[in-house]
Image: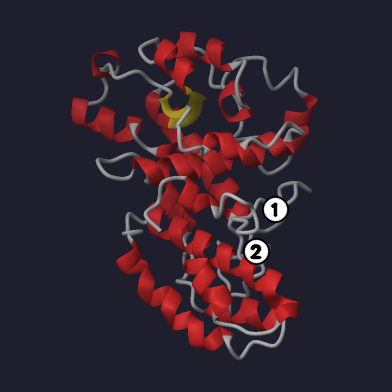
Amino acid sequence: MYSDTIANGAGGLNLSLSRTQDGSNFVDLLVVHRAIHDESTRPDDLNRAVLDAVPLVRDCNSAEDLGAVLGAQLPQLDFEAILGFGLRGDNRAQVRYILARLTAYVQQAMDQENIIERYLAEERAWHIEHLFPDHPDRHPDLTPRQFRAIRNRIGGLGLLSAPDNTSVRDLPYEKKITWYRRHNALLAVLSPGYQQRNPALRKFAQPRLEKLMHDFGSSPSLQEVVETRGRLFHALAQHIWNPEKLGLAIPNPTQDDKPDAPLTGVPQLTCDLVHDRGCWCRSAGFDL
């Protein structure tokens, strides 16, 4: 695996854990950034970025050195691309992985169990859920092509267990959101009244997310929901994959590299190679 390659490129037992973690975070960030920009995450296409870093990490004498070396190998980060990112013919694994990371982060922020391993388990017990059923005739303001393009963006998607996804797949939006109330917070918040009755969610959303993380009533426009939730996911992605929090120093950080302020005090969820099942992006189905 690529993070093993980075870890093996450096000597010194005192840095072995840091190298493994920073290497995992580097690969994770690289894969996610390439995915949202619709770039290939195939091993052959990742080889150059990873292998170019190997001789450089051999000269690292501290965790700070390693973070600087790996950070310098990253592309200029631009998470605004997530606004247009969504399902297409060959990227279901990437979409599912990113939804799982976003969902798990919010669940942990709500003091709920972090079940990222279940979201990404090999048996695929969790499915990608479309907030709006595949009925373009219910959206006469859009052409069928426009409807499907907007519906498939990440802001129009969520993560739901397989049996529930099957049960609600064809329900209209106003009935789906009632069902969502019993599920993860990123979906449950779409149910009117859920936020008012959930102080943990209100605390998490304020002040940066309160205009993005809310319900839209029972009959919102498809565009409004997808665009607003896309901005919500952009804000969450900036925090989850903020290189500074991942121990990766960017030479000339942009706004996306360094958000204005942390969203909450939630511990950073990292792509932890120490976990006995290996890095999350591999368990998600990426060909790494």
Say few, some or many: other residues with alpha carbon within 10 Å of mark 2 (under 14 / 14 to 19 / 20 or more). Answer: many
Which amino acid is tagged 1? Gln
Q: Horizontal and vertical percent for residue 25? A: 58, 63
Q: Is residue 171 above or below residue 8?
A: above
- Circle 1 crowding by C-alpha within 10 Å: few under 14, some 14–19, many from 20: some
| Residue toward you, 143 or 264 | 264
- State yes or no: discs 1 and 2 in contact (Cβ < 8 Å): yes
Residue 252 visible to the viewer:
no
Is 156 rendered above or below residue 233?
above
Q: Does residue 281 appear left or right of residue 244 in this picture?
A: left
Determine the secondary structure under disc 2.
loop
Residue that badge 2 annotates: 246
Q: Residue at x 47, y 44 (%)?
A: 97
Question: How far from the left and from the top, in percent, is residue 22?
Answer: 62, 68
Along the line of sight, the residue nearer the viewer: 191 or 246: 246
Can you identify the residue that label 1 sits on? 268
Give the quadrant of residue 165. Answer: top left
Residue 227 rendering spot, x and y as whole percentages: 44, 37
* Residue 38 - label: none
Q: Determine the secondary structure under disc 1.
A: loop
State the residue in front, 51 or 142: 51
How far apart marks 1 and 2 lie (CA) works out to: 8 Å
User: At x 48% / y 13%, what residue is drawn?
Assistant: 176
Which of pointers 1 and 2 lies earlier in the amino acid sequence?
A: 2
The quarter of the rendered structure image containing the C terminus is bottom left
In the rendered structure, which amino acid carries the disc numbered 2? Leu
Q: Position of residue 26 (x, y in %)?
A: 54, 67
Q: What residue appears at the point 56 percent right and 21 percent down from the top-left corner?
A: 190
**Residue at the spot x=69%, y=22% of the render?**
195
Chosen colour scheme: secondary structure
Q: Answer with left or right where residue 71 lies relative to residue 230.
A: right
Q: Is residue 29 visible?
A: yes
